[in-house]
Amino acid sequence: MEPDLDRFTSRRSTVYGSRGVVATSQPLAAQAGIETLRDGGNAFDAAVSTAAALNVVEPTSTGLGGDVFALYRTADGEVGAMRACGGAPEGATIDAVRSAVAADREAEGGESDGAVDPDDVEMPHRGPYAITVPGTARGWEATAEKLGRKSLAELLQPAIRYATEGYPVSEVVAEQWRHGEEVFETDHAREAFLFDGAAPETGQVVTLPRLGESLRRIAKEGADVVYDGEIAEAIATEVQARGGFLSVSDLRSFEVEWPDPVSTTYNGAEVYELPPNNQGLIALEALNVAEELGAGEHPHGSVERVHRLAEAMKLAFHDGHRYITDPDYEDHPPIGSKSWARRRAREVGEGANHDVGFGVPNANAEDADTVLLTVADGEGNLVSYINSRFAGFGSGVVAGDTGIALQNRGSSFSLDPDHPNALEPGKRPFHTLVPAVARFDADDWAAFGVMGGYMQPQGHLQVIANVVDYDMPIQRALDEPRWRYRESGELAVEPHFPDDLSAKLSRRGHRVRTMEAGHFGGAQIVREADGVLSAATEPRKDGNAQGY
């Protein structure tokens, strides 16, 4: 029987704890985080343990072959960020990729006369040319060393246990896994992630022994084995055998960064996001424009409110996709500032604006696969931690016998040299991942995020507005029906979005389209308010929040 993941909704309550809370998309991963907290770890230790477990129990969306980012507040009040995001290989020039892709298409008989003009090819969505340097292993290790109190080896134990002893596959993950069956092109890739050639069924107990062995090696040797050891050799050998450019030298040169967060205020709340190369500025601009338009002054379910929020989001995407890139390669104007928002808000009228383009750098990022987790402990630490390979199972390339599927984040590059996200060696691609932190009052903080490609900043806008403008409990703030502005210019809404509100939006000129709930992201949030810890999780996923 085919699963129907959108038919039913179930009520869930905000979860409370006195010593720690964890919210993420998989119960088994949340258990790993709680186990770490109970064993004396802090929120950052629990974040790494949970993320590693997600690598195993939700392998469709995350893994060692991807990237990881964090936004956090420490017990002493510091708000900080971590970015473990690799760049393009040194050999990956525009000309080199164009020539390689053209040659592949010619070999496959892509043109009737056998000739393919390299100037006509685009950046591939999957395969070896879309692979960038993975940052996950270094990011986990750096988080544990700088912010945690446990060793990486200790934090990987729950993930190793799940990978080697087995776990039952959850409903949403089983459906995602089924869509990934056709991604793998080599025998060792299929052997690593398929079972008798097929994705697992819901409830089927599976093991991932190759991935488990790689996790064991990292626990024993540290992240160096991924960047300058045998796993690094396996990664480079696999990519180059497939015609790609990633080398051990590229891996060896990777470093984790600790950038200063960017922030704004929204109706009294302070919201912190990651700076470029991420979408954080898009979320901040949308919040600023929405505040300038007075969106929160209207009733929650009113057309006036949703129209203003959607128009703010359009402007933010237009500007973000025009200007955001790797800041080491190009500067950007102050799109996250209040003055910028005041100017842009003047362009919003009572009807839908169809003159603003989405400016999408990569249409395939409309619905990317990602995991987000949030943790708070009883000491005052809280963190939003986000991991991804981009598309489901990333590039589809698995590094030898390591069980590590490599990301396709490089597909966000353009082969147009005049594009702000033009491919350059060492350059980091435009990145969709955006963890966030908010301060609602002096002693009221939250770590949150909404995974899902271009849904992420839109989810930030809607969740923050729900909490700040309408004082919603955090679980209700996640449960409320969502909308999203799409690359096509449509305003998509969930099946349980009010029909009368959709009709009113249509009369204002919005091209409203109803889509399945799975297209509207996966949110997680933890909150510390006056010493009380709480957590809420995404009803659109296999979400689970736990406390103790």
Image: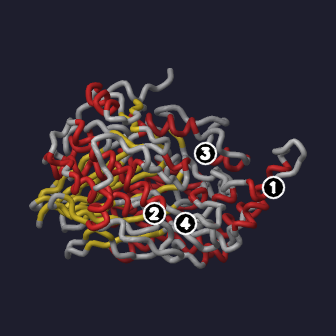
For marks 3 and 4, give the CA distance.
36 Å
Q: Position of residue 325 (x, y in %)?
A: 50, 67
Q: Check disc 4: other Cα within 10 Å, few if <14, some if 14-19, many if 20+.
A: many
| Residue in the image at 79% along x and 55% along y | 102
Q: Which residue is mark 4?
A: 420
Q: Is residue 219 visible?
A: no
The answer to which of marks 3 and 4 sits earlier in the sequence is 3
Q: Secondary structure at mark 1?
A: loop
Q: Secondary structure at mark 3?
A: helix
Q: Which residue is mark 1?
A: 117
Q: Is residue 231 above or below residue 26?
A: below
Q: Nearer the viewer, mark 3 or mark 1?
A: 1
For marks 1 and 4, give the CA distance.
23 Å
Q: Pointers 4 and 2 in contact (CB under 8 A)?
A: no
Label annotation for residue 193: 3
Q: Nearer the viewer, mark 3 or mark 4?
A: 4
For marks 2 and 1, give the CA distance.
36 Å
Q: Which residue is mark 2?
A: 68
The colour mode here is secondary structure
Q: Is residue 146 above or below residue 322?
A: below
Give the residue type that dot 4 points to: Pro
Q: Check disc 1: other Cα within 10 Å, few if <14, some if 14-19, many if 20+.
A: some
The answer to which of marks 4 and 2 sits earlier in the sequence is 2
Give the residue type that dot 3 points to: Phe
Q: Nearer the viewer, mark 2 or mark 3?
A: 2
Q: Nearer the viewer, mark 2 or mark 1?
A: 1
Q: Check disc 3: other Cα within 10 Å, few if <14, some if 14-19, many if 20+.
A: many
Q: Position of residue 90 (x, y in %)?
A: 67, 74
Q: Position of residue 47 (x, y in %)?
A: 35, 61
User: How many dots with numbers?
Assistant: 4
Give the residue type that dot 2 points to: Val
